[in-house]
Image (spheres, grey):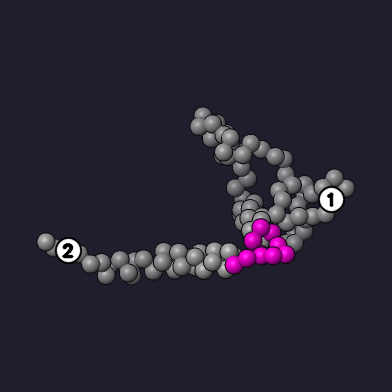
């Protein structure tokens, strides 16, 4: 299994055309439906390898692409989302530098 290969769970005869935004593994209970007493077992069933994390990020990227960027009549939402994300990212990485410039009221 190298870089750029299909997932091992993908079967073109069963699943049809490949969709990079779809998880082809065994379905599990969604996080929203997990009870508090079952969270430990649910987290234990997750694959925490770096390859699984990269696949998760890739699927999220493609879901975002299919929803906001690639529709026939895409709006301006992805540009505002990208700009907002960049603003938040640069604020977080520059926070230690700008936190020293707070205005204090002494009276």
Q: Regarding mark 1 in the picture, which secondary structure is present there? A: loop
Q: Residue at x 50, y 32 (%)?
A: 36
Q: Identify which residue, 34 or 6, lies in the foreground.
A: 34
Measure how far apart labels 2 and 1 are at the Cα level: 65 Å
* Magenta-drawn segment: 66-76
Pointer 2 residue: 105
- Judged by its main secondary structure, the magenta piece is loop
Residue 98 in the magenta stretch? The answer is no
Q: Is residue 28 above or below residue 88?
A: above
Quadrant of image for the C terminus: bottom left
Q: In the image, what residue occupies the spot 57% across and 68% down?
A: 79
Q: Name the one closer to the observer, 65 or 57.
A: 65
Q: Is 31 on the left or on the right of 96, as rendered?
A: right
Query: Which residue was labeled with disc 1?
Result: 16
> Residue 60 location, x and y as percent?
63, 55
Q: Residue furthest top?
A: 37
Residue shown at the point (72%, 40%) measured from the top left:
26
- Looking at the picture, does residue 15 appear above or below residue 20? above
């Amino acid at each position: 299994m190298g870089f750029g290969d299909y997932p091992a769970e993908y079967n073109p005869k069963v699943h049809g055309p490949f969709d990079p935004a779809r998880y082809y593994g065994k379905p599990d209970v969604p996080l929203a439906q997990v009870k508090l007493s079952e969270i430990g077992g649910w987290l234990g069933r997750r694959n925490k390898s770096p390859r699984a994390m990269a696949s998760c990020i890739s699927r999220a990227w493609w879901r975002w692409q299919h929803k906001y960027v690639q529709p026939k009549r895409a709006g301006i939402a992805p540009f505002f989302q990208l700009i907002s994300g960049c603003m938040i990212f640069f604020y977080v990485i520059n926070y230690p530098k700008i936190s020293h410039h707070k205005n204090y009221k002494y009276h």
